[in-house]
Image (cartoon, grey):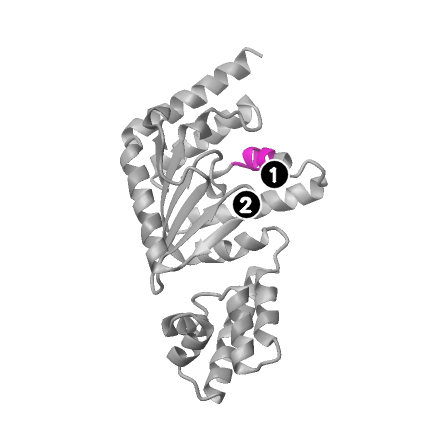
Amino acid sequence: MANGSRQAVWEFFGAELKRRREEAGLTQVELGARVFVSGGYIGQFEQAIRKPQLDVAQRIDEVLQTDGIFERLCRKLIDDPRYADYFAHVVELERLATKICEFAPTVVPGLLQTQEYARAVTVAANPFKTDAYVDEIVAARLERSLILDDAARPEYWVILHENVLRIPVGGPQAMAAQLDRLVGLMRERSAVVTVLPYEAGAYPGMTGDLRLMEFEDAPPVAYTETSFSGTLVDDPAVVKRAQRAYDLLRVAALSPAASLPLIESAAEDFRRCVSTT
């Protein structure tokens, strides 16, 4: 679905929710209480600031007795075959975020991936898929990265475990190019990238990726991901714990000034591998 049509459906969702809620004689706070979210969240749905997850849409249908209209609209919004179900909502929130903080323990984050690197990661995860499928996934990933080229781009802070610099995803040449891209973004000040070195030892949240997102007019969220699933969390207490974990990672990581030559050195190591083959 094109971005414009997705936005139109999102705005229709909000307008229809407001109309049906008012017809039922409920305030935002009252409806929120019945579907287990805050009244402020209902307001964000109605203003198309934030899209509700499927289970919330289903509860809204039940409370307002709307014969499944909000569930159907929500499925239309999240029905994008290029993304796993658990990640589609995260993609929408990326576009709204004013600040993104990410920790990647094994793979370069999608927003920073080159085409060759993204293709290698996608093929490794989908060895029996067609080239057309792989091309679509890679194109979607590169499309997401365009938010870093926007004048209104979010602040983007990334902590990479040193593993990410050493695993030759796509081969030495692809890795050298990928690390060069990181260096370029750092020098352009499009992203703040730091490295958690092997010497740091154990670290918080050792089971997967961690992402924190902040917004202009909405509460922050946390997203965690492992190999086959992801969890988007907006419970304030849990988000606060995730933020503390990220703070601990930031303290253990090298400074940007120390991370830059380490990334450059890793890129040079891969280039030497290419020249000797």
**Front one among 243 and 175:** 243
Mark 1 highlights which residue? 122
Which kind of residue does numbered mark 2 sit on?
Arg
Residue 149 seen anywhere in this rendered image of the structure: no
Contact between labelled residues 2 and 1, with CB atoms less than 8 Å apart? yes
**Front one among 170 and 39:** 39
Point out the tag, 1 or 2, that comes first from the N-terminus: 1
- The answer to which image quadrant residue 72 occupies is bottom right
Query: How far apart are the two marked residues, 1 and 2, measured between alpha carbons?
Result: 10 Å
Place of residue 220 in the rendered image (x, y in percent of width and height, measured from the top left): 36, 57
**Front one among 54 and 275:** 54
Mark 2 highlights which residue? 141
In this rendering, would 198 be left or right of 120? Answer: left
Q: Which mark is residue 253?
A: none
Which kind of residue does numbered mark 1 sit on?
Thr
In this rendering, would 142 be left or right of 209? Answer: right
Q: Which residue reaches farthest top?
A: 276
Place of residue 124 in the rendered image (x, y in percent of width and height, measured from the top left): 62, 34
Q: Nearer the viewer, mark 1 or mark 2?
A: 1
Secondary structure of the residue carrying tag 2 is helix
Q: Residue at x 50, y 68 (%)?
A: 56
The C terminus lies in which quarter of the figure? top right
Q: Residue at x 47, y 80 (%)?
A: 18
Residue 242 seen anywhere in this rendered image of the structure: yes
The N terminus lies in which quarter of the figure? bottom right
Q: Residue at x 60, y 76 (%)?
A: 69
Alpha-carbon neighbours of circle 1 within 10 Å: few (<14), some, or many (≥20)?
some
Secondary structure of the residue carrying tag 1 is helix
Alpha-carbon neighbours of circle 2 within 10 Å: few (<14), some, or many (≥20)?
many
In this rendering, would 119 be left or right of 25? Answer: right
Q: Which residues are magenta?
A: 114-122
Place of residue 97 in the rendered image (x, y in percent of width and height, measured from the top left): 39, 56
